[in-house]
Image (cartoon, rainbow, N blue to C red):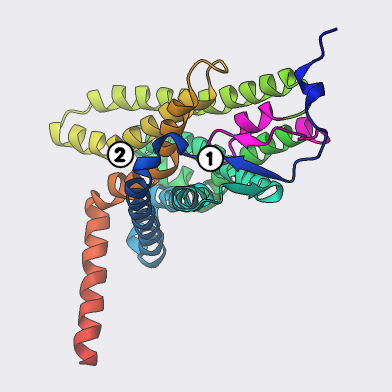
Amino acid sequence: MMINDRENVSRTIVTEFVLLGFSNLQEMELPLFILFLTMYMLTIIGNALVILLIHLDSRLHTPMYYFLSNLSWLEIIITTTVTPKMLSLLISKTNTISFFGCAVQVTLYFLAGTTEVLLLGAMSVDRYLAICNPLRYTAIMSNQVCMLMMLSCWLGSIICIVVGIIFKSGLPYCGPNVIDHFFCDTSPLTILLCADTTLIQLVEFISSCFTLLTSVSVTTVSYLCIIITVMRMPSAESRKKAFSTCSSHITVASLYYGSSIFIYVRPAGSTSMDFNKVATVLNTVVTPLLNPIIYNFRNKVVKDVMRDAVKRIGDKLVLRV
């Protein structure tokens, strides 16, 4: 009589997981460690600088920069949740993570990641109102409305997390405990459950589709309206200014949407885990590094604020001497 493979697995409850990381790139571990460590440090410094500048200078106290400040916080959370463990896998022989640590990692990653997806949609609405309805923009995008939009993004993310927890609660991990990834991603974890995961995988797929495609749809519709409005502007200078305002958001949104859809909105097993790892590196290491550069440091207002801040610091140092 045939016995299901799951029945042959020891029923010892899993207390830790083994992360394979980049085990197939052992000769590249040191160069990758140096590269990712440098990128991680630059990401933290860049996003922290954006948050500090927006907080301290009144010229940046506008809805657009309010959302950018929140985006920088989310990028710090996402990259800090994943990158330190990834770095330790590259230089340490210890490739295990506790059950509790794994649960915290996957929860924080998806909480911040889902919030960022929804925030990108909210930011596209902000750009739509600023360009297509400039006379009423200030009245519509009040501080209360901005905070409500941000709160809605967090609430939507929490609901997605809670739904996943409800469906997985009470289901045991009883072996094997090997995850072919450099962090605790939801798909490899779901596969390790000692139960029929068909319904759980379906719920996760629907949740990912709904969140991502809703945000993508809002962004697409907003920018279609923006393009129509901009093309009707009589001045070439006005059109150039409007497009330059939106180009940063389009670039970052395309990067994040594209990699997220590749990882989560496709049939299970349609691509190898190696491709998943590359896409996840794009999401957790590359995009958080590029965001401050694309969104802020190319922006004239932010450049002026940074120049003034450096000048004030220089003047204070001269006075002390």
Q: Is residue 267 above or below residue 94?
A: above
* Mark 1 / mark 2, whichever is N-terminal: 1
| Residue 183 lies within the magenta run | yes
Write the residue at 76% across / 35% down. 173
The C terminus sits in image quarter: bottom left
Residue 106 image-quadrant placement: top right
Residue 205 image-quadrant placement: top right
Residue 239 image-quadrant placement: top left
Dot 1: element? helix
The amino acid type, in three-letter code, at marker 1 is: Gly
Mark 1 or 2, which is nearer the eye?
A: 1
Write the residue at 77% across / 20% down. 196
Which of the labelled discs sits on residue 113, or is there none?
Answer: 1
Q: CA distance from mark 1 to mark 2?
A: 19 Å
- Hey, which residue is sitting farthest bottom in the picture? 321
The residue indicated by pointer 2 is 248
Write the residue at 62% across / 39% down. 157
| Residue 74 lies within the magenta run | no
The N terminus sits in image quarter: top right
Query: Relative to 283, is 267 on the left or the right?
Result: right
- Hey, which residue is sitting farthest left in the picture? 236
Where is residue 91 shown, x and y percent of the image? Answer: 44, 52
Q: Nearer the viewer, residue 80 or 244?
A: 80
Where is residue 297 shown, x and y percent of the image? Answer: 26, 52
Provide the residue span drawn in magenta.
166-192
Where is residue 6 shown, x and y percent of the image? Answer: 77, 22
Query: Relative to 114, is 300 on the left or the right?
Result: left
Q: Within 10 Å of the Cα at label 1, are there few (<14), some (14-19), or many (20+) other Cα atoms?
A: many
